[in-house]
Image (cartoon, rainbow, N blue to C red):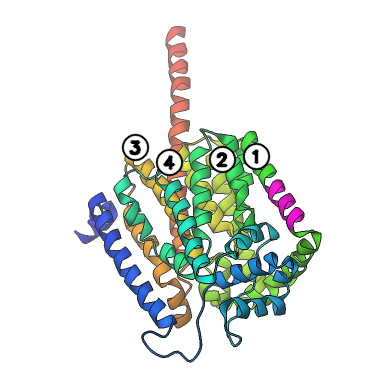
Amino acid sequence: MVLGQLRSGAWLDAARVAGYGRLLLVLEIIAMIVLAAGTYGLIVPLDRPASTDFISFYAAGHLADQGTPALAYDQPSHRLAERTVFGDADLPYDYWFFYPPTYLVYCALAAHLPYLVGFFAWGAVTGALYVFALRPILPRREMLVAFLSFPSAIIAFGIGQNSFATSAIFAAATYFIDRRPILAGAILGALCYKPHFLLVAPVALLAGARWRALGAMAATVALCIALSLLLYGWETWAAFLQLSRTATTLTFETGKVGFAGLVSLFGAVRILGGAVPLAYAVQGVAAVAGCALAAVAWRQALSQPVRAMALIVGSLFAAPIILFYDLLPMTVAIAWLWQDARKTGFLPWEKTVLAVVWLVPLASRSIGIGAGIPLGPIATIGLLVLVARRVMREWAEMRSAAAGPVLESVAEATSDSR
């Protein structure tokens, strides 16, 4: 009985999704308030101050506003700026800045505001963009609150990350790709602040012969680079490129950014004790798989929801450096999947797998730290499998439909010959 419910997904209807989502969101907000109160010593005294990832963005923007943008990539200077803007010379945290100068434009705007005002404005603006872009995709508007309960959303807001903006870009680009391809391509190009998330998009657009979208994406990337050069000069790009040569080796390969925080297969191999070359080899296979899935969906001109899912999930699966808060674009893929399921129905086990995927970011980092188990990739692998099933099913249906008239013609010709 229980197994049958899990297989059919009958236990998870729309009303329960909305109800569970509201409950989870309330619990997450309470947890965030408690953590914030603890962070500022309102619950128990703190031995040392705590901060968020946003301090890295704000410090880089502060340096850019001071006319020294290249120093954002000089680690001692950036560390000093973090202590300055946070108001504590003994701040024990080092949040380095690895983003390209195209991202400095946004950071510089935020740094014009006082730190806390900038922090909340960052979350509010990017969060609003996410909601605005996601709403047209959701099959039912009342489910928006449930989608906001995805753990990566509250985490991204709490630490001031850019996952809302990334998710909004994926949502808007996949929504407009058939309606306004040039706009969709331009929106995708804006993701150049996280270039490792753009590994799959060109493959998908090339496979689907979406030349206008591909051209617009390339033009936007070029425009963003040109603007950063105009504002910050070549020396800033040179400093970024110099830091990039050592950033991966000194930070991600060695675990300075903990392997438990990574949700890629690269991180999974490293947390299990695998060597760096093995981790890269496994991640290489993942990148090929992500690109192949998107290429098939776009080459065969499958339905918009299936193509959108393949592009987003393929991008997340292919990226070597992806942390638990970066999983927020999965909600966009899930919204497209839900929309497709309204026409075709949910496949066996699909809802249950989605429920598991939904909860993974809530525990992946803590379980990774405490037990050394790479839980994070379960989310990307699980969703990749669900999307691959839908790609293969729709492709098979298209081939069957195309073969139908041919078989009828053969039958008629055979009948006439008799």
Q: Amino acid at mark 3?
A: Lys
> Where is the C terminus found, in terms of image quarters?
top left
Q: Position of residue 392 (x, y in %)?
A: 46, 43
Asked if residue 12 is positioned above or below residue 138 in the image, the reply reads below
Label 4 to label 1: alpha-carbon separation: 31 Å
Q: Nearer the viewer, mark 2 or mark 4?
A: 2
- What label sits on residue 216 in the rendered view? 1
Question: Could you give the CA–CA distance between mark 3 and mark 4, rounded to whole angstroms?
Answer: 13 Å
Contact (CB < 8 A) between labels 2 and 1?
Answer: yes
Lower position in the chain sequence, tag 3 or tag 4: 3
Marks 3 and 2 in Cβ contact (< 8 Å)? no
Q: CA distance from mark 3 to mark 1?
A: 31 Å
Amino acid type, mark 2: Ala
Mark 3 / mark 2, whichever is N-terminal: 2
Main SS, magenta region, reads helix
Tell me the amino acid under the disc marked 4: Arg
Give the mark nearest the N terminus, 2 or 1: 2
Ranked by sequence position, the earlier of labels 4 and 1 is: 1
- Quadrant housing residue 288: bottom right
Q: Any mark on residue 280, and which? A: none
Determine the CA span between mark 2 and mark 1: 8 Å
- Residue 184 is tagged as 2
Considering the numbered disc 3 on the image, is that residue within a helix, a strand or a loop? helix
Q: Which residues are magenta?
A: 221-231
Label 3 close to label 1 by CB (< 8 Å): no
Check disc 4: other Cα within 10 Å, few if <14, some if 14-19, many if 20+. Answer: few
Residue linked to disc 4: 393
